[in-house]
Amino acid sequence: MMCMYTWFKNSKPKLLLIPMSLALGISSCAQPYSQLKLVQEGKSRYAIAITSHASRYEKQAAELIRQYTRQVTGVTLPVLTADDTTQLHQPVIAIGYTAWVPKSWLQDIQQLPEGSVFIRVQAPHIILAGGGKRGVLNAAYSWIEQVLHCRLYADNVLHIPEQRTLTIPSSLQIVEKPTFSFRQVYDPQAMNARYMDWHRLNDFADFWGLWGHSFFKLVPPEKYFHTHPEYFALINGKRQPTQLCLSNPQVRQLVVNALRERIQQNPDARYWSVSPEDNTAFCTCDSCEKLYATYGGVSGALLHFVNQIAVHFPDHIITTLAYGPTQHPPQHIEAAPNVGIMLSTINCDRSEPIAISPRSAPFRRDLEGWERLTHHLMIWDYTVQFTHYLAPFPDFHIFQPNLQYFAQHHVEAMFEQGSGEDPSVFDEWRCYLLAKLLWNPNTDEKVIQQDFLQGYYGPAAPYIAQYFGSMQHALEQSHAHLDIYGNPLDAKNSWLSPDSLVSYHQLLKRAMDAVQNMPELNMRVQKIYLSYLYVRLLQAWFYGTDAHGAFMENAAGKWTPDPQIQRDLQQFRQITQQMGIHYLNEDHQTVESFVNTYQQMLRQGVAMSLAFHKPVKLLTSPIPDYPAKGPQILTDGILGTNDYAFNWLGWYGQNMEVEIDLQQTQSIHELTVGFLQDPRHQIFLPTAISVRVSKDGINFTPVASEPVLEGQLTDQAERKDISIQFTPTEARFVRIMATCRKSLPDAYFRPGKLPAIFADEVLIH
């Protein structure tokens, strides 16, 4: 017996004592080589061998081995073509199905799943092969990483060690099988072809002929709605181009025809999406309602619809989305054998692994239900805070347990949606870690982190590790919810408290000091420093005239901008410009607009009126999801922006009624209230405003009541200040009622949704 160094699927490297005859599948071939000297003192006897009919992946693998061996050792191995072992009289690295592969190994290799890696020594030769078409390419990158010890930390950060001598054990065997057949990370790093190949990532364009929300790609409203409104959803008694009518047989035939035409143009694509649009406005016609009743909801009607389409395309997998109204598994129906379900994790908590999080229990039930209904379960996962790309979002600790959980439930495809083409804080580390875990969820995450941080941040690595660790610890201690559509201000009293920010700043300052004379490394650390600056700026705006706010009261009693906040804003703009960071969120709010709006807020100063810092009583209850500072947000002197989650109080489906105590009787004649109009989120201006006043807080007198003109609605969110003037009157207490509209406009109607009012500053003069 001898010791064999072996990698197996979903396991860390381990030393296994295996009889060599059994491991090699041959009865008696004593191995005379204990070590293979691939390169010795800058020289090598080896060549790279491919066949005359080598595939493009085999040729690419051969060139990669040649290229990186030269960069590591300085030796250029020749790439030779040979279909017979007698044609070459030297040891070789044989790429693919060559004559050097023992016949006893062929069946093992051919049975490997697509993309699998097979590297094994048949001394003095080395065999690199793999499962399916791309396996041999993946094997080349496994060799480059594990034998040559090269690293690609980011799309432009390549580590090449120098080795004059390269020796490998004759017992070397690397066998790797990907846990998931499809693995995509939708982040900036993974937009690079070399990065994707190196880290064995996929692109949906190579697998899907049609991706994502696809109903209107197959049946375009601009082509059909005018002449055939019955093809589309019946909403609130009217046909609307929001979704397709799932019960209409003509719609089904249109989808089949459109899909057939697309498949004829791209027959090699395995997956084809037939999925609803990204909204909740599904058809409510009688026929669709019957389907919902029969199959337990919209998801059942959708699956019935997709099953009927899939029968026409038995050689392809027709996928659909379990997302929003279609998230929950249906009843009394199963997916056809060639129908795949792409289940969304959009509502999951990101502070704890899905398998143990109480807040993710509904998702677990959905996943387990869909697992029973389909042979092709897929996951659409999310890894960033889409509302704030530059804010810290410490969800790295859940990646490994979540992927292990998905593997246990037989998920075959993983789509990890990050910030897409837009840079975000930590995107390099996030993409690197996810790529490694998607390939093997059981790999040693601590080893990966240590290797990446040291390789990418150099001397700053210990401080970056402490930054990650302290933030993660604070999150765990707080038991706070981590929401992909949240706001960093949500954590202002927990893991992103002002005191916590001071601690994080100290760590990041030490990290920058450690690489101050290394411009490239310093810039990488400064990108992380952006996360501190961004949260600090948001908090300063939010706190306003309170502690940690953007304004300071001078000796004359006037509020002026804090000079440090002005410096932070300038540094934030400078770093983002240097790094080419243009957008803050998935809605593509620009950094430039954020900075300009912030500067305008500082120049504008505190909004002063008789109501400034006066007590506010809420007579109707606002939405608890967006508490801001509570009622005092209405008189804090800081105006809300276009973001409904920032500095606003909202009332859902009811009137806004508040009372302001001026604390002494005064003469007043004008009142202004700021409102948000954001139709995309069902937030509208009130239909009317009325004002009543009182001297004693008991007996109130009406002084003004005016309707509010809505104007033309657009998808653009905007703040509107509405003023009411009235005859000067003496009052201490002022009651304001803003009337909420009774229903949503047709263009923005969504079943089960009500209109909301969002208000911010109340100014009284």
Image (cartoon, rainbow, N blue to C red):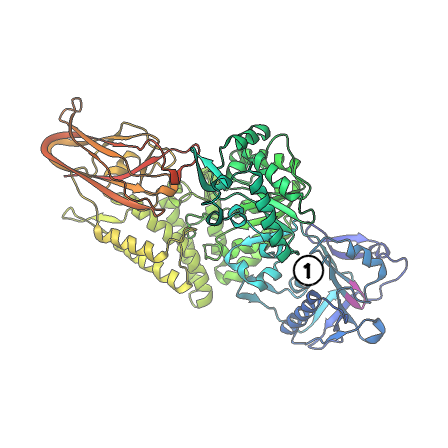
Does the image show residue 518?
no
Residue depicted at x 47% and y 47%: 221
Quick check: is 125 in the magenta stretch? yes
* Foreground pick, 433 / 362: 362
**Which quarter of the rendered picture does the N terminus lie within?**
bottom right
Q: Secondary structure at mark 1?
A: loop
Residue 556 part of the magenta-drawn span: no
Q: Residues within 10 Å of mark 1 (few under 14, many from 20)?
A: many
Name, please, the residue furthest toward the front.
227
Residue 366 or 455: which is nearer the viewer?
A: 366
Q: Residue furthest top?
A: 698
Q: Quadrant of the C terminus?
A: top left
Give, as a three-letter code, the residue at label 1: Arg
Task: Give the magenta part as a residue range.
Answer: 121-126
Residue 536 located left or right of residue 470: left
> Which of these two is toward me, 154 or 303?
303
Residue pointed to by mark 1: 134
Q: Where is residue 463 drawn, in percent x and y? A: 47, 55
Residue 339, given in percent of the width and then of the height, sits at 64, 43
Above/below status of 637 relative to 654:
below
Task: Decide whether the magenta segment is chiefly helix, strand or loop.
Answer: strand
Q: How many marks?
A: 1
Image x and y of residue 496, in percent = 40, 45
Q: Position of residue 357 (x, y in %)?
A: 54, 36
Judged left or right of residue 611, residue 590 is right
Where is residue 645, by image quadrant?
Answer: top left
